[in-house]
Amino acid sequence: MTLLHTLLAFIVVLGTLIVVHELGHYWAARWCGVKVLRFSVGMGKVVWSRRIGPDRTEWALSALPFGGYVKMLDAREGDLSGLPPEDLAREFTRQSVWNRIVIVAAGPLANFLLAITIFAGLYAHGIPEPAPLLRAVPVNTAAYEAGLRGGERVTAVNGEPVQIWSDLRWQLIQLAVERQSAELQVKPRDESASRTVRLPLASISPQDLEGDFLGKLGLDLARPMAKLGKIADGGPAMQAGLREGDVIVAIDGKPIVDGVALIELVRSSPGQVLRMSVQRGGQQLELSVKPEAKKQNGKTIGQIMVEVPVAPEMVIASSSPIDAFGKAVRRTWDSSVLTLKMLGKMLVGELSWKNISGPITIADYAGQTARIGLISYLSFIALISISLGVMNLLPIPVLDGGHLLYYSLEVLTGRPLSERAGEIAQRAGMGILMALMVVAVFNDLVRLMS
């Protein structure tokens, strides 16, 4: 069922993005007066089709689900000498260079508009996410040296308001790419006056961005204290005398900052006796518990058979429709710019090519976000739509960006690219795309095996 769920989620993502992208080309072509012969979702052999509209455009589903296309009346694809003059006037290459630029650019633009629409809807509706509360900060980290200790609520980064944890991460990753420092406005848990701390990001290398770069800085999401929930009958916790509502404040003399720290320590201590300092009402107790050794995914872990709540404090970040739209536009723009910067760092060797993902990874994330909930799934669709728009604008022949490059040269020189040069460029572009696909699929398989 999980595999089927993942496949369905991936198909919805892929189908949505293809249809939106190609509809951009389709509507722009119609607006510019170009005759559209076929609108296909998928590539290869047509398996189903129906002709609709005054032009009898063929709307089709094709055998290969990866991709799609809009086929316009084009003199480069066959002899059009037998067509009536009114149809010849609607042929693609007979249009002005500016009309051709509009038609080609409309596909990526449609992807950006889809992302803006989704983000605006989510921001207006309200996004439930963890609050930007900091966990206890480890010593010898940039956050600790900046004066952060944990329990603070981050309210702004470099003057930009922060409502939820993802806002904080998004602001910091953009600054880290530029290797700039961050001015964090923080408010202590006791609600005393807020203060500003300067967090240097020079210690973050491009390679750190591939993993948990916030953890490297010493920043982590605050979790509830280690307060025990329901205790299983006959389990190690019950045998040791632990009760629901007990708060574990230390183990073997080491403070336990939250429920996550308790779970991690218990899991790493199978068969070992742990001396727990327990807060029960107004009493301080000392109890010993021995976690049972259990096999999980080929590893031996410790369990004491008790529930420990670890859900972070949640807030709902919402905006007015106008603010939501402005925020959506900024998020789409910033995501596009960040994608280009990351690609640039890959080209100069500052970032690993392991960051390139293919269809397997995208399908996996589609399934994961769909299982989390609709908001996460829609956010994922918006981000993939932005990536698709950016990738299609790259100046690689066979992509929209390659065609835009041809037409830009035509504007500058006053004449179109020669057929011979176009053929060579197309072959080179196809080679580049195939190489990128091989890298992406290889990375997917490595991630899958690891």
Image: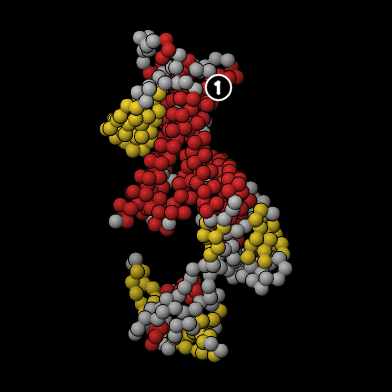
Tell me residue 212's x, y (percent): 53, 58
Is residue 225 found left or right of 51 in the rendered image? right
Question: Residue, x 34% and y 85% (percent of image)?
Answer: 234
Q: Is residue 425 above or below residue 260?
A: above
Alpha-carbon neighbours of circle 1 within 10 Å: few (<14), some, or many (≥20)?
A: few
User: Residue 4, how many percent across, how many down?
Assistant: 30, 52
Q: Residue at x 33, y 67 (%)?
A: 298
From the image, tell me which residue sits under label 1: 98
Q: How is the image coloured?
A: secondary structure
Q: Residue at x 55, y 14 (%)?
A: 415
Left or right of 180 on screen, residue 432: left
The reply to whether residue 55 is visible in this rendering is yes
Residue 53, percent from left and from top: 37, 25
Numbered marks: total: 1
Please determine whether, in this image, residue 433 is positioned above or below residue 129. Answer: above
Three-letter amino acid code of the residue under disc 1: Trp
Q: Residue 17, position in %: x, y?
A: 43, 40
Q: Element at badge 1? A: helix
Q: Is residue 223 above or below residue 3?
A: below
Q: Residue at x 38, y 83 (%)?
A: 236
Q: Is residue 296 left or right of residue 313?
A: left
Image quadrant in which the N terminus is located: bottom left
Quadrant of the frame with the C terminus: bottom left
Towards the viewer: 94 or 425: 94
| Front residue of this view, candidates 200 and 314 | 314
Q: Is residue 350 visible?
A: no
Instruction: Decide: is 19 above or below 159.
Output: above
